[in-house]
Image (spheres, rainbow, N blue to C red):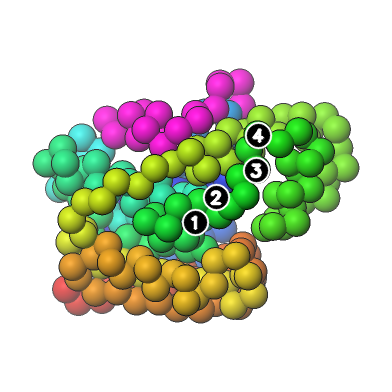
């Protein structure tokens, strides 16, 4: 079993590295390493969902018979959702479970007003005011900020220019997680994900805000592990 994780805007695979100690040995962890992020900082970041999917789709054409699942957080949930639909259209194996965290249902579109076109300082203040999550060591270090900002703006461009197209629901179960202190993506909003599966849907609130996986990591990984290892 492989659990593929898709980071939030401005995030990197490193956010998921602590999960390894919470998962069973038979659940392998893999995370999206997009251009412009982490070890790929020297590469230009993608600016659309389609660009991201075109790059990662070939990896799934060779996965064979291994079972796999997706967890996407915020922007990552949209990427994971659209990847599952692309796999279906290509006649390739689909995830056995889709886990989404702190993400508006795709049919609702992005939160408005859009931020990606704002000037640098206004953009940073707007992102931090809406979601928080940018560490002070990044905000207070001009050199680090100059590296971080282009990837963050590109990710917001991906999210805010995404256009949902209606398709039949997925066959895999969907489990949604919402932060109990997240005013922008509350639990009642995430019920809209139920429309995208013909299988089971589950919604759980976890302590924390938009980045609840930091405060409630054990509860989140425990819930994911339980669903991945439950008898089918």
Q: What is the quadrant of residue 228 in the picture?
A: bottom left
On residue 73, which mark appears?
1
Point out residue 9 in the picture as x, y percentages from the top left corner: 57, 45
Residue at image location 69% in from the left, 57% down from the top: 130
Find out whether the residues at labels 1 and 2 contact each other: C-beta distance under 8 Å: yes
Q: Is residue 169 left or right of residue 71?
A: left
Distance CA(mark 4)–CA(mark 1): 23 Å
- Count the marks: 4
Q: What is the quadrant of residue 200 in the picture?
A: bottom left
- Which numbered disc, 3 or 2, marks the residue closer to the eye? 3
Determine the secondary structure under disc 2: loop
Find out whether the residues at labels 3 and 2 contact each other: C-beta distance under 8 Å: no
Point out residue 112 in the picture as x, y percentages from the top left corner: 59, 52
- Which numbered disc, 4 or 2, marks the residue closer to the eye? 4
Within 10 Å of disc 4 (Cα), the crowding (few <14, some 14-19, many 20+) is: few
Within 10 Å of disc 2 (Cα), the crowding (few <14, some 14-19, many 20+) is: many
Up-down: is 135 above or below 99?
Answer: above
Residue 48 among magenta residues: yes
Find out whether the residues at labels 4 and 3 contact each other: C-beta distance under 8 Å: yes
On residue 115, which mark appears?
3
On residue 8, which mark appears?
2
Distance CA(mark 1)–CA(mark 2): 5 Å
- Image quarter where the N terminus lies is bottom left
Q: Earlier in the sequence, mark 1 or mark 2?
A: 2
Distance CA(mark 3)–CA(mark 2): 15 Å
Find out whether the residues at labels 4 and 1 contact each other: C-beta distance under 8 Å: no
Looking at the picture, tell me which residue is in the foreground, 87 or 165.
165
The magenta stretch spans which residues?
41-59
Determine the secondary structure under disc 1: strand
Distance CA(mark 4)–CA(mark 3): 6 Å
Q: Which residue is mark 4?
A: 117
Residue 227 among magenta residues: no
């Amino acid at each position: 079993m492989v659990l593929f994780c898709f980071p939030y805007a401005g995030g990197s695979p490193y956010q998921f590295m602590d999960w390894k100690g919470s998962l069973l040995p038979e659940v392998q962890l893999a995370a999206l390493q997009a251009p412009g992020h982490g070890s790929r900082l020297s590469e230009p970041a993608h600016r659309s969902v389609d660009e991201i999917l075109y790059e990662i789709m070939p990896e799934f054409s060779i996965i064979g018979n291994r079972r796999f699942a997706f967890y996407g957080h915020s922007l990552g949930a949209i990427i994971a959702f659209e990847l599952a639909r692309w796999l279906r259209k290509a006649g390739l194996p689909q995830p056995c479970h889709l886990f989404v965290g702190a993400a508006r249902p795709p049919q609702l579109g992005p939160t408005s007003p859009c931020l990606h076109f704002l000037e640098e300082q206004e953009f940073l203040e707007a992102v931090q005011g809406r979601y928080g999550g940018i560490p002070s060591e990044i905000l207070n270090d001009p050199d680090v900020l100059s590296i971080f900002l282009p990837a963050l703006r590109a990710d917001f461009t991906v999210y805010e220019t995404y256009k949902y197209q209606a398709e039949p629901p997925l066959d895999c179960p969907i489990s949604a997680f919402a932060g109990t202190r997240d005013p922008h993506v509350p639990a009642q909003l995430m019920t809209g994900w139920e429309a995208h599966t013909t299988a089971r849907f589950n919604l759980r609130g976890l302590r924390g805000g938009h980045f609840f996986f930091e405060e409630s990591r054990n509860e989140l990984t425990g819930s994911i592990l339980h669903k991945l290892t439950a008898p089918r």
